[in-house]
Amino acid sequence: MKTINKYSASSMLIHWAMALIILSMLFLGLSMVQSLAVWQIEAIALHKSFGILALVLVAIRLINKVVTTSPALPPSVPKAQALAAHLTQVGLYASMILMPISGWLMQSADGRHVSFFGLFTLPSLVSKDIETYAFFREAHGLIAYAFLLFIFMHVSAALYHGLIKQDGVLGSMLPGKHK
Amino acid sequence: MSKKITLIAIITLFALTILYFTGAFNSDAVTAQRFVNLQQGEQAHAGFRRAHAKGICLAGSFESTGELAKYSQAKVFDLGATPFIGRFSIAGNNPTAPDLKAPVRSLAFSITTDDNQEWRVAMNTPPVMAVATPDAFFKQLQALSPDPVTKKRSPEKIKAFFAAHPESAVFNNWKASYKPTSSFATEQYHSINAFYLVDENNEKHAVRWIAKPQLSDENIQPLNNDSADALQLQLKDQVAQAPVKFDMLFSFATAEDDENNPTVLWPQSRKTINAGTLVISSLQAQEGGVCADMNFDPLVLPTGIEPSADPILRARGAAYAESFRRRAKEVLLNN
Ligand code: HEM
Ligand code: HEM
């Protein structure tokens, strides 16, 4: 098998697009549940639409992951670090999937519609029930914090590779010529 | 070396950004969480609403006159009847408070039409707010709260608050002249905040509405003044006799009215349309009742009704969600 040291262009595109959307979603989510400002309603509507977009993107991303080859970590990375990187990745993928789904379920459980940018309304996933609402509302909040932790670890590790180790790990997700 | 510093700087900045968005640094801002903390008081009543905790569930039918249909695309205003569920309540965070001590009474309802569009409404007895922003409302509640030590309200604090907020004059005038009625069924309930009706041509009409009782105190069942549940008991007797009805009167703003300011009254002369009648035909205790599990968030609106930019109205969504989140979690964990 040919060894590669870069992600495919499609993988890079979807990685960076989702990174942007998800970080914005996390920060918007945290702000809007506290805010009493006049923009709160529009923020919630945007949050739901972009959240559904993220769900679509994660589905595409999973397919893309199966059909493309991901570069392996360089052999210089110690076993423990490689394991940590792997676990962080699993956490990132799990959060990416569970965040939008818990959001949609939470809205369904309070009988609220989820509109996709005003274009169409998504079906309700569960019937209205306060305990179901509580479960998915708390899940949405808890997974968000886990997600932030995974992202923090992921970003720190990527920068460590890029700035200190300079072993091509960061470059593998960046366009252009890198080692 | 400088690379290490760059790395540490970026990571620290990222961590601080995350903390910033979690609200770690804005201890002064009035957030939904701080608002609900204030409303629930020192000892929250687990499983209950943090405001308007005591109430009774109701069900009935909205009989639309069809007269509002040309101003709004919402199907609920087409001629015909749509079932609804709702809730009468009293203001305050105590689910066992004496009914007759409450300064404010309320009526909330939720109607879903067959096109699956829902309209949630929460109305109060005052026609206006004392203040126009959530920050000022927070300070008002703080001023009205009893001192944690003496358990007494401070008249000086209250006086100082209202003196600093001359816009509260309309509210205080109303308060001075308001006499609570002898029944939930004879009060008049107000939307207070304005909304837009959106018609077929996508034109917006700023409106407020009131639920005006068809009954008056002269022709109702007696009230037992000694009972803590006086209003609920009276209502049960009343509904047992005949359905309790309210007319939904919508008044339309003119260019002179500011639909984003909930502290001012609109003149009586404004065009008013009777959209239909709320016919309340059955009641159910809050404990185990359908309305206990509802969040009457006034920002859940059907196509054809939109929120105004009133800062009070727009603050309600996040606050109701926070209260709903807390009690929903308690219901889940206690069952
Ligand atoms: C990538 C996807 C998503 C991310 C990263 C995300 C993130 C967040 C975060 C961080 C919060 C604040 C949680 C808290 O402080 O407890 C939040 C709240 C919320 N999210 Fe999401 N979310 C996503 C998708 C969705 C989707 C798809 C929906 C609905 C269709 C949704 C609906 C909501 C709602 C309604 C709230 C506010 C809940 C409340 O007011 O109590 N989210 N979200
Ligand atoms: C910034 C202003 C306001 C805040 C922060 C606020 C806050 C709250 C909260 C936290 C609840 C409990 C929600 C729940 O757990 O379901 C509530 C309930 C309620 N509020 Fe407000 N409120 C505000 C303004 C108003 C106004 C202007 C009205 C009347 C027009 C109103 C009428 C009601 C009613 C009727 C209920 C009880 C609804 C029910 O039966 O469930 N509120 N409010």
Image (cartoon, coloured by chain):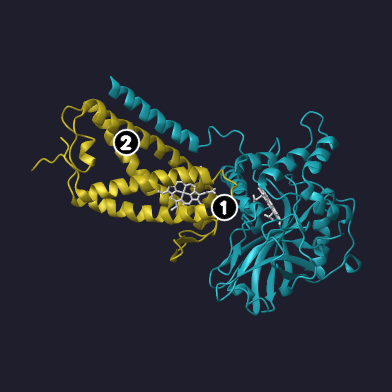
Q: Answer with left or right where residue B95 lies relative to residue A165.
A: right
- SS at mark 1 in the image: helix
Report the chain holding disc 1.
Answer: A
User: Dot 2, crowdedness within 10 Å: few (<14), some or many (≥20)?
Assistant: some
Asked whether residue A140 appears in the rendered view, the answer is no
Q: Amino acid at mark 1?
A: Ile
Quarter occupied by residue A125: bottom left
The residue that mark 1 highlights is A130
Q: Residue B335, image x and y in percent? A: 58, 45
Q: Which chain is cyan?
A: B
Quadrant holding the N terminus of chain B? top left
The answer to whether B201 is drawn above or below residue B313 in the figure is below
Q: Which mark is residue A50?
A: none
Q: Answer with left or right where residue A144 lies relative to residue B271.
A: left
Q: Are marks 2 and 1 on the same chain?
A: yes
In front: label 2 or label 1: 2
Q: Which chain is yellow?
A: A
Calculate the distance from the C-alpha at mark 2 to the C-alpha at mark 1: 33 Å
Asked whether residue A149 appears in the rendered view, the answer is yes
Residue at image point 68% right, 48% down: B133
The residue that mark 2 highlights is A88
Q: Amino acid at mark 2?
A: Thr
